[in-house]
Image: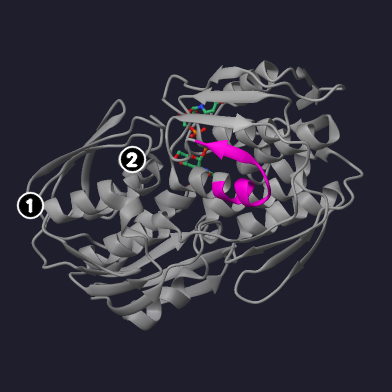
Amino acid sequence: MDLFRIQGPVKLTGTVKVNGSKNASLPIIAATLLAPGKSIIKGTPRLSDIEVCCQLLESLGCKITKGDQGELNIDSANIDNPVGDYEIVRKMRASIAILGPLLARCRKAKVSMPGGCAIGDRPVDIHIRGLRKLGAQIHLENGYIVAEAPDGLTANSIFLGGPFGSTVLGTANIMMAATLAKGKTIIESAACEPEVTDLANCLNKMGAKITGIGSPRLVIEGVEQLNPVEYQIIPDRIEAGTFMVAAAITSGELTLENCKVNDMMAVVDVLRNIGVSVESKGDAAVVAGNGQLKTADLTTQPYPGFPTDLQAQFMALLSMSKGNSIITEKIFPDRFMHVAELNRMAANLRKEGPTVIVAGVDKLIAAPVMASDLRASAALVIAALAAEGTTIINRVYHIDRGYEKIEDRLNPLGANIIREKT
Ligand code: EPU
């Protein structure tokens, strides 16, 4: 298991290119199952989650080769085993995204029920409800979701909202399944995240007929078949936001290339309000901190609201602001594993239910800390860049799930991060 030794404080300056989006790549890779043949997905990030996703498709019968710059050549001509095995699914919850495509293509699928994780229980009841509405018979058997639709799926009107709003992968699953269903499916309360839009655009390029893309009402006219595709993944708005926070907390200045600021308005709004300059220049963004951070009250919400995947990083940032900030988590109310770890670094955070009161401190101080989940770990890296002394972050495999060699990206910008084997 690797650890990070991070010396701070530093000031980050320079240019970094944002990678392709992890959370767009995963369902799009799964979507290639819908069209027998050779698809080319370009610009996927080199991450352990993408690796797991490829292993999963290979276990179903796909053949995958990797080209340069994150290109995946996926041959899904033969699916001889429509079973998402527990041993792979348990490594990555997003594996559930194969359920809809497998069921639509093979008329049956068996996928291990994903477990909970550090950010909460994470049920898949809405996915199952949606697929049942499309006519699938579904039951649970020894920890597996067993779904069947011997005569194919049939379109329906489906409300996909849940107790915490829309569901990203739930929308992806039902949308993918509906592309091959007989008739016109309407999804109400669909997730509007840019990653869902990217998937819908990819599906349309494969021959699907989806309208209302980017809105909470998707209309999907079922087609007989989809065709293999060549598709370029959008930039990762969460990675971009993480770099923006890193620039802000170190009072640095970073130019982010391949950055879609328009997909990040809620994030940019908070940054500007607390005194961080964000300028959009074509497909780049220039972000500069001036060392004087104001407070913010932010609440995570489905897109276009503030993303839960940047909540932890902003907590690290606001812990150095002048005064009290309030952060409320409305997507995953238990996603606060980073609170105790940031407090070990001399932050002053107090959790009250799904809200954290962040009392700004003048400085953070290095400490040994534990990475718990992907975004919480990114928050610890960010705090460590600004903290005085050497922070040791254990279990960095969590970071590797969502950030490609983060030390190789940040060190050329002025960070001092050493990866060590333990
Ligand atoms: N929910 C249900 N029932 C369901 C599905 C979801 O109650 O059947 C609840 C969840 O428990 C949560 C809320 O609905 O409270 C929203 O969850 P959602 O389904 O949207 O999450 P997801 O699709 O499983 C994706 C991202 C997450 C990101 C969330 C929210 C991928 C691979 N994962 O998860 O990304 O936090 O949307 O935006 O796209 C990450 O990258 O670190 C990450 C966790």
Label 1 sits on residue? 322
Q: Is residue 25 left or right of residue 149?
A: left
Amino acid found under the numbered disc labelled 2 = Pro
- Secondary structure category for the residue under label 2: loop
- Quadrant where the C terminus sits is bottom right
Label 2 sits on residue? 304
- Secondary structure category for the residue under label 1: loop
The nearer-to-camera label among 2 and 1 is: 2
- Quadrant where the N terminus sits is bottom right
Q: Is residue 237 left or right of residue 52?
A: left
Asked which quadrant contains residue 417, the reply is: bottom left
Question: Sequence-wise, which precedes: disc 2 or disc 1?
Answer: 2
Q: Residue furthest right?
A: 80
Q: Is residue 307 left or right of residue 418?
A: left
Amino acid found under the numbered disc labelled 1 = Lys
Asked which quadrant contains residue 244, the reply is: bottom left
Q: Is residue 314 left or right of residue 24?
A: left
Identified at 8% across, 61% down, the residue is 292
Note whether ligand 1 is within 8 Å of mark 2. no
Q: Is residue 205 magenta?
A: yes
Q: Which residues are magenta?
A: 201-211
Residue 370 percent across, percent down from the top left: 44, 53
Dot 1 alpha-carbon crowd within 10 angstroms: few under 14, some 14 to 19, many 20 or more: some
Identified at 27% across, 73% down, the residue is 254
Identified at 36% across, 60% down, the residue is 260
